[in-house]
Image (cartoon, rainbow, N blue to C red):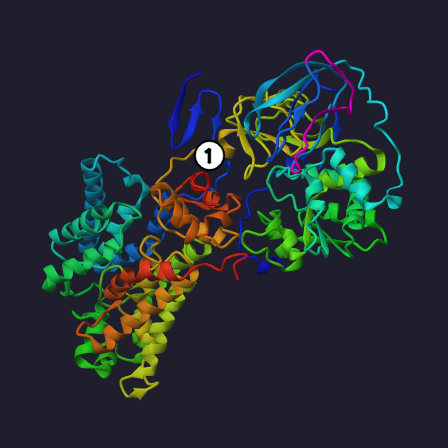
Amino acid sequence: MSNKIKWGIHPDTHKTPTESKAIETNKLPSKVIIPVRQHIGAPCVPLVKKGDSVKKGQLIASSDAFVSSNIHASISGTVIEVADKPHPVFGQSLSIVIENDGLDQWEDGVLVERNWEALDNNEIVEMVKNAGIVGMGGATFPTHVKLVPPKDVKIDTLVINAAECEPFLTADHRVMLEYSERVATGILILKKLLGVDSVYVGIEDNKMDAVKAMKAAFGDKKVNVVPIATRYPQGGEKMIIKTLLNREVPSGKLPMNVGVVVQNVATAIAICDAVRNGIPLIERVVTVTGSAIKEPKNLLLRIGTTFADAIAQCGGLKFAPDKLIMGGPFMGNAQYTTEVPIIKGANGILALGKAEIKLDAESACISCGRCVSACPMGLNPSMLSLMAEKGFIDETKDIYNLLDCMECGCCSFVCPAKRKIVHNIRYAKKVSAAKGGK
Amino acid sequence: MSTEVINNNVVSNEIYVSSSPHMLSEVSTKKIMWTVFATLMPAVIFAVYYFGMPALTTIILSVLSAVIFEALVQKLRKKQVTVSDGSAALTGLLLAMCLPASVPFYVPIAGSFIAIVVAKQAMGGLGQNIFNPAHIGRAALMVSWPVAMTTWTNVRYTDAVTSATPLNVLKLQGYDALINMFGSQSEMYKSLFLGLRNGSLGETSVVLLVLGGLVLIFKRYIDWVMPACMIGTVGILTWIFGPDGFFTGDALFHMMAGGLIIGAFFMITDYVTTPITRKGQIIFAIGCGVITVLIRLLGGYPEGVCYSILLMNCATPLIDRFVRPVQYGRK
């Protein structure tokens, strides 16, 4: 399979510092900052105010909008502030700050043991919605929306995206090794819910131990655990569908249009916990790594833990990082402060030094075509970038299919002139959207 | 916290913030250019050994003047001087390699002027030129100093003392005269392969040029399909349209003669002036092969590599417009 793949790149994986380190549960932070905006779509409305005492698992913000998901307190304590705070993706967001009372007490009635196999599908969707579960691979799209496809769409396959193709990140890898039973249960719940026979778990072949663990966890259940070529961006939704099923999602459409629902490994765990035990999404595994981190680790962190607290649990910083990133080095967001919180979609904190980020000056495009060869979508990134810079926004959209770009960053990575191709493409998308050109 | 802006990156004393991706590959324009420069060195050293000091003088004049012209124009245009990226030096070197060793000193300087100032900087500088600058330089010299550009002095290698290139002999005196020139057919192949023949100073040694080209292919700086398509097209066409009817041509001779090897490995693999997609590059390379053969077999000049490349350069924007990569989800 691997030698057929012509798209993408094969960067250094940088996974060795953390891939063999067991997930650590460390002491709870003294405070958490929980933004009411975790993802695109409607922000939630806070249900608590300053001075309220809250318990772990208590609903603290919600919204009536369809594309939205509930937010729960991740520790017990007192709300000390409801105010705008730095946000790792949106710059700023209204956030609920909870001071830890050190008791870590569950809200009454949250924890319930259920036999999920006996549950009705509508009940399961309701539980997923109530638990505030979102796609935890980075896109953070509310999960329950994906689980209720429109009536005219027929879903025949569930794909579990466990590629973890981003360098540095090992959170999903460790989760599959250490929490394989919960991952498998979450996947089986999804299988039942979607009523599909065919389930694929795609894992990059640099994690064969995870393939083995997942196969063992499924036992005699009919689930295909498939090692796939280690190639960035294998974990892109469209790429993994193509690799596993040889289906292409048509331009402008969603995976469900080719009969597929894609879910991430961490999301499967959240679903298992919510449906089987009533636990809302209040914690996740995060890889904290990069050359500036003293002891890179995989940490189980409460949502709202600040980067500063997470880094402190890894022995602190060796030196002031030149770049601080939430997520992976290819699609993550650069941060300007360590006072930003872990949100539901945060799979990594990277504190990188100069050697890792490179700050070479941009020079002229020499039309070498590396970006064209690397683009997994078959676009012409150099032309998109040049036209965006010159202001030919309509042409980028109409002739060069601007909106097909998923911003994976392969083009900028391979560019010998170090051109800010993705940056320019994002700019073109923004201008195009502002013109109403969707 | 003091901040400044460098290339869209807001840079503070503490932390860099920019749009993703945050990881970039090791390859750079500078590295590519100087690597290509280095892979030409074996052929250059051979040229100096074989053609003597005039070759060295021509090369040094050409490279130096190219670099100086580039710096001067960039200063005049109030642009950043980027001669350290190696592109001007490489253009100068490629130009020199397409010249007879013993041209008067002003010829390589004039060629570099045309190549750098007219063909490259006047078009907007690196990345903007339509035509291969080295070949534009050579073409301009061909019409300006036709005698100097076709005067092949005797070479050091005593067994091959002659003042004509093999393609010239073939054009003017025919195939038998060509064989006689080398003694036998196998001697001819051997001489061409090793580079023991007259011609432009850097084009003669097939083995050393291919060696350099293979290094570039191995490093993935160039794609093997381009040289393969151009050389293959020339081989097939010259074999089919032979002097004594169909399928009688000497393909091997045509593939090793003239500037084909340096053209196929080092000229049509110039990124700027050739198509950006692989399919487009194949069309380009085959087009170059066809035009080369047309000029060699039917045209007035004995050699056509330079003009074939310049003509196909014109077609590059058109090829790029119509030949697109296969797009995901748009079948």
Q: Seen in the image, is A323 located left or right of residue A191?
A: left
In the rendered image of this protein, does residue B239 appear above or below residue B321? below
A74 or A177, which is in the foreground?
A74
Q: Seen in the image, is B132 located left or right of residue A93?
A: left
For the point 82% across and 38% down, the residue is: A275
Indicate whether residue A61 is drawn in magenta: yes
Q: Position of residue A212 (x, y in %)?
A: 77, 49
Location of residue B170 by image quarter:
bottom left
Name the residue that disc number 1 marks: A358
For the point 31% across and 78% down, the residue is: B238
A1 or B62, which is in the foreground?
A1
Q: Which residues are magenta?
A: A50-67
Q: Position of residue A429 (x, y in %)?
A: 46, 42
Considering the whole magenta stretch, tell me its main secondary structure. loop
In the rendered image of this protein, does residue A35 appear above or below residue A210? above
The residue at the far top in this view is A51
Location of residue B4 by image quarter:
top left
Q: Secondary structure at mark 1?
A: loop
Amino acid identity at mark 1: Lys
Subunit of mark 1? A
Categorize mark 1 by other alpha carbons within 10 Å: few (<14), some (14-19), many (20+).
some
Q: Position of residue B191 (x, y in %)?
A: 30, 70
Q: Position of residue A262 (x, y in %)?
A: 68, 48
A436 or B70, which is in the foreground?
A436
In the rendered image of this protein, does residue B318 appear above or below residue A390? below
